[in-house]
Image: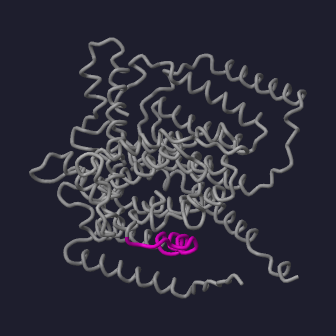
Amino acid sequence: MISLLEIFSEKFSSWPFSALWACALTAGIVVGLALINTMYMTLLERKVVARMQNRFGPNRTGKWGVLQPFADGLKMMGKEMLVPENSDKGLRAIAPILTLIPAVLVVALLPWGETFTPVLFESGVLLFLAISSVSVASIFMAAWSSRSKFSSLSGMRAAAQIISYEIPLLIALLPVIMASGSLSLGTIVLEQSSLWNIFTPWGFVAFSIFFICSIAETNRTPMDLPEAESEISGGFHLEYSSVGFALFYLAEFMNVFSLSALSVSLFWGGWQGPWLPDWLWFLLKTYLLVGFFFLLRGTLPRLRIDHVMELAWKFLIPMGFSNLFVAWFWHSSNGAFKIVGSFLFLIVSFKFFEHLNSKFKIEKRKYTFVD
Amino acid sequence: MNLDIMSHGVALLPYALMASIVAFAIGAIVLNDLMRAAFCLGAIWILSGLFFMVLGQEMLGVFQIIIYAGAVLSLLLFSVMLTDISEKISSLQSLPLLGFATAVSSGLVLVLIKFSSGITVSDAHQKAFYSIQDLGKSLVQNYAFPFEWISITLVAVMVSALTLARKDQNRDSR
């Protein structure tokens, strides 16, 4: 496999500062792709949720509302940038920028097509997770520097939730890395040329765990506790307006896209598919998962924080370890035995962990009514 | 990364990273605001990871970022958030202490320069010969004992943390 950066550096090899030109062009393509994708994802979400609520959604700016993202951007930039008097102004200013940087960087690691990977890394999966894991620090930065109680609560919620869900997310990835024997996203996609991982029992369970963790990692409904409007009024971006808020908003959508794209590369065969160009297959599959994020937003109510944490620690982590065993069993046995055995073990472990969790009765809420 | 950045004339990058790491390290020590100091520490970890990557040690850099900048920094920030920092820490503001710290760190830098005078960045930039299989094998064969020992220590730390965090029921009932 060859990366876009290598293709450009070969093309510009006769130019002075060829490496710089190649880097600049690759970076430009990555940023452009990330921004255009995100802008139209916001429109798509509004359209999907609107149809679910029997509305039309934005349809006045351009045909079918296609210019709505630009109008939203202009409106955001025209708003007043409010800064709380007691806030830590320096940290507060750089927090949204630091949230956006990792979100854009991970787009560069995605294999968009057979010859369309912006930058190739031998340990691409790990690097993706490493860059994503840094985003929690910038959320903390925004929460702390705002000097607001709601924001601080949100920072704590974000840290607890994101760290907790990093563990099952990593455990869900292990069977895929075991099966392909590589940490390179390109190799993992190529290894699925005969059978996509999602069509194996361990792959299906790993994908389910990965997808649930993705929802928690991106702070999306029903696990949007760090932003919960009805409880903490938006949380860490409560004190942000104008461009600052827009950057957080963009970063959240970019993370949704990149985690969906990572799922596609790890479990859904990446850019592979018949008849259509490889990049189109990649986008179609990714947008299918992104659409599922939107459907969940329009359908499910917000979970309680203790339920969210219990799901990670008491169910997803043990289930991830069971799945690791099933992946080993799948690769070390043959015939009908491996299919029946894998399904049987997964069903038994699912029921077992469900039974174990059912013993922990969730405390009933105590309502205190105002006189 | 397959593209050799160093050979394309961006040889200054490691030095820029080193200078930034030193600048943030000074910030982490000198800043009075605990949260800002913690963020400086986070920047050091991220830049160190990048530094390893630029020197060709990709895996080391990735793990540096995942473990330190991802997990440890979050825990550090979490603990700072729960710390009562209403009392100002003024010990570092005193000039003699700052002077002492500067003298010690300058001495350490001089010692480093003295002992690393023969080593250049291009020496350190060697292609790492590793694979996941090699790493896994060496972990369970050569380093099995330290690996298990660390895991036991971690379990002990977790149990201790749980014990400390548990509610003291006798005190609550009083």
Q: Which residue is drawn at 35% across and 70% down?
A: A205
- The C terminus of chain B, quarter of image: bottom right
Q: Is residue A217 magenta?
A: no
Q: In this view, does A18 lie above or below A112?
A: above
Q: Is residue A100 above or below residue A56?
A: above
Q: Residue A324 at what x, y percent from top left?
A: 39, 67
Q: Residue A240 at what x, y percent from top left?
A: 57, 47
- The N terminus of chain B, quarter of image: top left
Q: Residue A321 at what x, y percent from top left?
A: 44, 69
Depth check: A13 or B38 in front? Answer: B38
Q: In which quarter of the image is residue B8?
A: top left
Which residue in the rendered view is the most extreme toward the left?
A275
Q: In the displayed structure, does residue B169 sit left or right of residue B156?
A: right
Q: Residue A103 at what x, y percent from top left?
A: 44, 45
Q: In which quarter of the image is residue A192?
A: bottom left
Q: What stretch is highlighted in magenta?
A: A299-317
